[in-house]
Amino acid sequence: MILYGKKLAQAFEILKQLMILNGEIAVTVKELSNELSLEILTAHDETDRTVTGGYCGDLLSWVMGRAKAGDAWISIMGNVNSIAVAVLADIACIVLADGSTLDEDARVRAEQQKIIVLQSQLDQFTLCNKIGELLKVK
Amino acid sequence: MDVIIIKIKYDFHIHSCLSPCGDNDMTPENLVNMAKLCGDQVIALTDHNSCLNCPAALKAGKSIGLTVIPGMELTTSEEIHVVCLFEYIKSALEFSEFVYSHLPTVHNNPSIFGDQLIMNENDEVQGTVDKLLINATSISIMQIVSLMEKFGGFCFPAHIDKSSNSIISNLGYFPDDCGFVAAEVSKSCNLEVLKQSHSEINELKIIRDSDSHSLDWLDFENETIDCNALTFQDIVDSITIHVDCF
């Protein structure tokens, strides 16, 4: 019975991955993190938030006016001002590319503001492509 | 004739409660008095993209015998911070208005970024600034030196050692065609290490400021600059011509 349950759970997971790949269901921050092997740098209570798009940029004044609510924001800027911009733009998560780091005061602020910050060793171009494929962004 | 040289303890980069990231305790009256207690003889008030608290700071400084230079920390279109200092409050306020017109119309959200309080010399709130002051202006790093000459001021890139909003972090190096003759490093900068990785800064006069956003940040051991007098021109001369501070 237990074995049957496990097999069912595995089958369900495969089906879910296929549906994500087909763009049939939304991707959450947690799934983004798992699919792209991202490290989560902040305490992560809010990883169920749906990611609906993406924005790539490092000039904060550009990001605040152009990133949309629900975007995964790909950047190399891990400073405290980035967190304020992330709150303002209501982004789903920040993805720091090229192994760029999160300042300690930014980490504290991100956790206070419930902003998830993820990290990848991949460069911004590669990350954008992979996230775009995952979200089926055209 | 012997030239008299005086050693001046200075701090040319301080924020008040006008900057959204500045503590609300950093009223012009408070910061001027704290700077005096810390032994500063000349300071500059340099809020983000605005000089609106400078009149109050100058009055506060005059009443306790501290020289206060009106200024601002401009954010260029490349998001590089540049400290801008003025001889006269009139020029500073004219430049402040010019800069404000070159900020995008993005409104401040005090709950996210902080308050932007305009104060008088009695620590009374006179108003708030609407546009977000930490945003980038449309003024490029290539324009700022000539703009400052036009408005009657002097400028230098701020905290060139920092990993964000610095000319080196944002452009990758310190360019020699912007017209800067001086540059600022932060309190904790290891200047020798910075010079090793960026030998192009050896030609510049380097100064060190606190970049205080809170009262406790004002107190730090700083080198002095050698001046003939506590006038704006003497101070600018001491930064640009006579003295290598380190």
Image: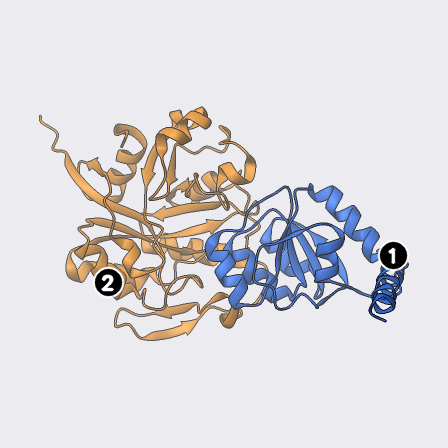
Residue occupying the point 50% across, 46% down: B165
From the viewer's perspective, tell me whether residue B131 is left or right of residue A97: left
- Checking the image for residue B59, the label placed there is 2
Q: Quadrant of the C terminus of chain B?
A: top left
- Image coordinates for residue B23, horizontal then vertical, percent: 37, 65
Chain A as rendered: colour: blue
Question: Of circles 1 and 2, which is in front?
Answer: 1
The x and y percentages for residue B188 are 34, 42
Quote the CA–CA distance across marks 1 and 2.
Answer: 65 Å
Q: Between A95 and A18, which is closer to the camera in this rendering?
A: A18
Q: Nearer the viewer, residue A130 or B144?
A: A130
Left or right position of B218 against B156 = left
**Residue at position x 19%, y 42% in the image:** B8
- Mark 1 is on which residue type? Leu
Under circle 2, the secondary element is helix
Q: Chain of mark 2?
A: B
Tell me the residue at 87%/54% (across/down): A138
Q: Residue at x 81, y 65 (%)?
A: A26
Residue B54 percent coordinates (x, y): 33, 59
